Image (cartoon, rainbow, N blue to C red):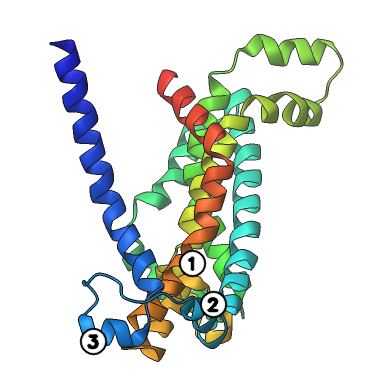
Amino acid sequence: MNKLRTGAFHTGMILLSLLWLGPVIWVVVMSTRSFDDIAAHGVGSLPRSFTLDTYRQAWTDGGELRALINSMLVTVPSVALSLGLAAVAAFALSRFRIPGRRTILLLMLAGNLLPPQILLIPVAKFSELTGLYDTLWALIAVQVGFGLGFYTFVLHGFMRDLPGEIQEAATIDGAGVGQIFTRVMLPLTRPALAALGALSFTWIFNDLLWAITVLRTDDNMPVTPALLGLQGQFVSSWNVIAAGTVIAAVPTVAVFLRFQRHFVSGLALGAVK
């Protein structure tokens, strides 16, 4: 009976995996087909050609290189600033008796409960008033501001559950607050930081809404809005659009594979706590 259940479970998981991988494989295959092949036989037909020129067109003619550079210029500082500030805030709120710390944490988290659609106009107007509109700095500030509350809430839960004796032992050994934070708390919360880092990189890198809210010129657009422009430029060249989509997915896949071990351990640690 157990073998039957195990076999049914594995079969179901294989089918679900194929269902998820099907569109991905279809996009990859379509990105290597020629325009004449797709035009003659349709996008859903079996491939009758193979070419990598579509990636060159998406990379150079479609501006994917510039868009990827913009995405990295936004994503890397946003992730570093968000997690750095969140770690400091979580450390203070979880390890020290700050008056109203629960209220502060709830207020920081409350911003994430608002639908982002109702904040589009205020954010755009505020970026104009500050002179940051249509700059990458505006997008970085938005990403940090709206992600900080959630990251602080998650890291607060990890740091709060760490044994207090660890901090007391470090204090007895003469460690100051800064040393306790950098040498004790940060190493112990590395799985949580890695998991949040992988998630925040994916969220920020793939963001579309805030990018088109605070940016206007094509030269400043990250990769996700650039894909919209690619659809307009190569409106009937589905193979080039598919190639651009594959290129845009490479950084997030690479980051997840790099931090996969820490990501899984971070989620498991959070589930236990």
Mark 1 near mark 2, Cβ–Cβ under 8 Å? yes
153 horizontally vs 182: left or right:
left
Helix, strand or loop for disc 3:
helix
Q: Does residue 216 appear in the picture of this structure? A: yes
Residue projecting furthest to the front: 48
Mark 3 near mark 1, Cβ–Cβ under 8 Å? no
The residue singled out by tag 2 in the image is 64
Question: Which residue sits at x=45%, y=66%?
Answer: 246
The residue singled out by tag 3 in the image is 40
In depth, the one of 64 and 23 nearer the eye is 23
Label 3 sits on what residue type?
Answer: Ala
Question: Which-is-in-front pick, marks 3 and 2?
Answer: 3
Identify the disc placed on residue 248.
Answer: 1
Question: Where is the C terminus found, in terms of image quarters?
Answer: top left
Mark 3 neighbour class, 10 Å CA radius: few under 14, some 14 to 19, many 20 or more: few
Label 2 sits on what residue type?
Answer: Glu
Question: Which-is-in-front pick, marks 3 and 1?
Answer: 3
* Cα distance in 3D space between marks 3 and 2: 27 Å
195 horizontally vs 76: left or right:
left
